[in-house]
Image (spheres, rainbow, N blue to C red):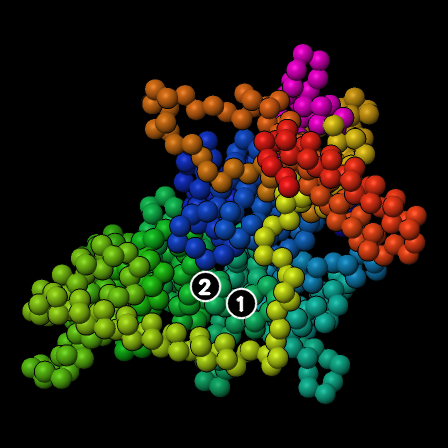
Amino acid sequence: MRIPSSTIQEIQQAADIVEVVGDFVNLKKKGKDYKACCPFHNEKTPSFSVSPQRNIFKCFGCGKGGDAITFVMEIESVGYVEALKYLAKKYQIEIPEEAYQPPTDEELQAQNEKDSLLIALEQAKVFFQQQLFETEEGKNIGLNYFKERGFQEKTLKSFEMGYSPEAWEALFQHLTQKHFKPAILEKAGLVIKREGKDQYFDRFRDRVIFPIHNVAGRVVGFGGRTLRKDKNIAKYINSPETAVYQKSQVLYGLYQARQAIRQVDSCYLVEGYADTVALHQAGIENVVASSGTSLTTEQIRLLRRFTKQVTLLYDGDEAGLQASLRGVDLLLEEGLQVRIVIFPAGEDPDSYLQKVGTNAFQTFIQKEQEDFITFKTKLLLKGVADDPFKRAQAIKEVVSSIIKIPDAIHRMVFFKACSEQFRVEEQVLISEGNKLIRQQKKFKNTTQKETAEVQKLPDEKVSEDKTTSFNTLILQEQESIRLLLHYADQPIDDTRYLVHYLLEELGDIQFETPLYQEILTIYKEALRRGEVLNADFFIQTHDNPAIKKAVIDLISDRHVLSEHWKEKKARIPQKDEVLQEVTYTHLMRLKFRFVQKMIEENKAKLLKATNDEEQERFLHIHQTLKNTEREIAQALGNVIR
């Protein structure tokens, strides 16, 4: 697929970085920018910044940065074209029909496999929807089932539900006719290859379909429910793990729920697909499910992007209770605030909602929800009676959950609550908690030491001449580019801009870093045409992703001046107010490092000289360079011996 450049420019201009990132992360305004915990690596303190002025994002923790297109590519692990298609859909920009040409063999070879899987899954979703709403089999079986469950057509379309017909190869034949290769369909988890034969059949045949979306709304997998009563047939089957679908990293319904979660700053967490859809239809839209798996750390971190308030809605059976305990400890460890609601025996959120109605359901949740200490204490004390050993074990269990809370103040509050409920002195509980923490640290340190010893290679040597500091010359090259990006069009004196002054002074100097040299060359060529470039040129129009990333890294400011400084009497000078002095000092430092580099190179040549004439010539060059080094050092105020 080849998207016209005019359409790409339209997408770039329409894509608001705050809106795009805000679909995946809960952003908080801070000064002129927006901050959040980074979605690309685990962190508790926000180091992820979004600049609406420059339309870019930057994480100062893991180093990722870019524009809206780059963000979608990174967060979704897709290629450039798929990211453009996502943004085009978001901003309702039509991609011309001529762009949808069959890909050439070379394009197929180069295409990201994840892109291919996502495209295949999207086409499968469309097929399942058509089967549900447009075929007699789908209407009579699938649609009828959904209506019996009370699901309205609007809800079915919101969650993009479908139906897979009874025929063994219906989807397989449909997609292969659209030129999808069987190997891609198998990798996407849509078909299964018959053992020992070059034949395939549909994985989800004869089932109603629940598409599983990622946060961006892309279909990454499916859940299929059989309508047959045969006990030999699994009630639910899910997509297998694929390159685009890992159960532990997906929350069912999050795409549909994310805006509601953000608005009310809380989330209900249930176990099943039907629970999620039923609550959403009833107007309780801030609800997600753990996608057919026990709650995982990755799912919790995904949810934490949108809220820290979570209420677990679990079935009242024993399995549900145990699942809630496991989930609570994981949620606490990631810094979330947890409440729990357990439904009456034999009920789940969907069935109880159907039984009592929306208003009574919401009243039940408000009345029955408990903080995790109250819940866990009640649960563990059941059947304990006055048995001191069981009571002591119950106390340890609750304390083991409290110490998982990262925030010290929250821990103290819960120690106090636990003390009151168990009628045990608070200090005793704190001491027990500290003891458990020490044991865990000791175990962790021992494990890490053993792992390190196992991984250590025999006779491993560290090079003595390995550098332990930054290459100062490269840092000065970096500063040259940073000055150009920030101030190229700023006057340096009455007749010149900074770009003229800096490029004239650099002359024919070639940068050591190829990327910085390429940017410098682009500035020189533009100046010959009478153009003065700024950072936006590289971010919005340049097609080299490495250059784009380097530019974003250099223009992103990690620290923002506090608003409180504006109230102070003291004046904070800005660098552009002393631009000529700053640029001059930088150029002297850069030249100083280049001269030092030339001295080292000349020394190497001197050592290899084979006759007196060569030695004399290199000695003369050495003396000239040393004199230049001394002059620059004096100008900078340094002393060279």
Residue 196's spot in the image, x, y percent? 72, 87
- x then y, percent, for residue 249: 49, 64
Q: Residue at x 58, y 57 (%)?
A: 468
In the displayed image of the protein, which residue is found farthest to the top?
A: 494
CB-based contact (under 8 Å), mark 1 and mark 2: yes
Q: Residue at x 85, y 46 (%)?
A: 618
**Is residue 545 in view from this perspective?**
no
Q: Is residue 327 above or below residue 3?
A: below
Out of 388 and 161, give the one closest to the viewer.
Answer: 388
Query: Height in image: 165 above or below 252?
Result: below
Q: Which mark is residue 298?
A: 2
Q: In the depicted view, which residue is nearer to us: 156 or 50? A: 50
x then y, percent, for residue 522: 77, 34
- The amino acid type, in three-letter code, at marker 1 is Gln
Q: Please tell me whether mark 2 sits on a helix, a strand or a loop.
A: helix
**Which residue type does callout 2 highlight?**
Glu
- Between 12 and 341, the residue placed more toward the observer is 12
Q: Is residue 486 magenta?
A: yes
Q: Nearer the viewer, mark 1 or mark 2?
A: 2
Which numbered disc covers residue 460? none
Check residue 617 for magenta coloring. no
**Residue at 33 percent of width and 63 percent of height:** 333
Label 1 sits on residue: 246
Q: Identify the magenta region.
A: 482-504
Q: Quadrant of residue 372?
A: bottom left
Picture quarter containing residue 478?
top right
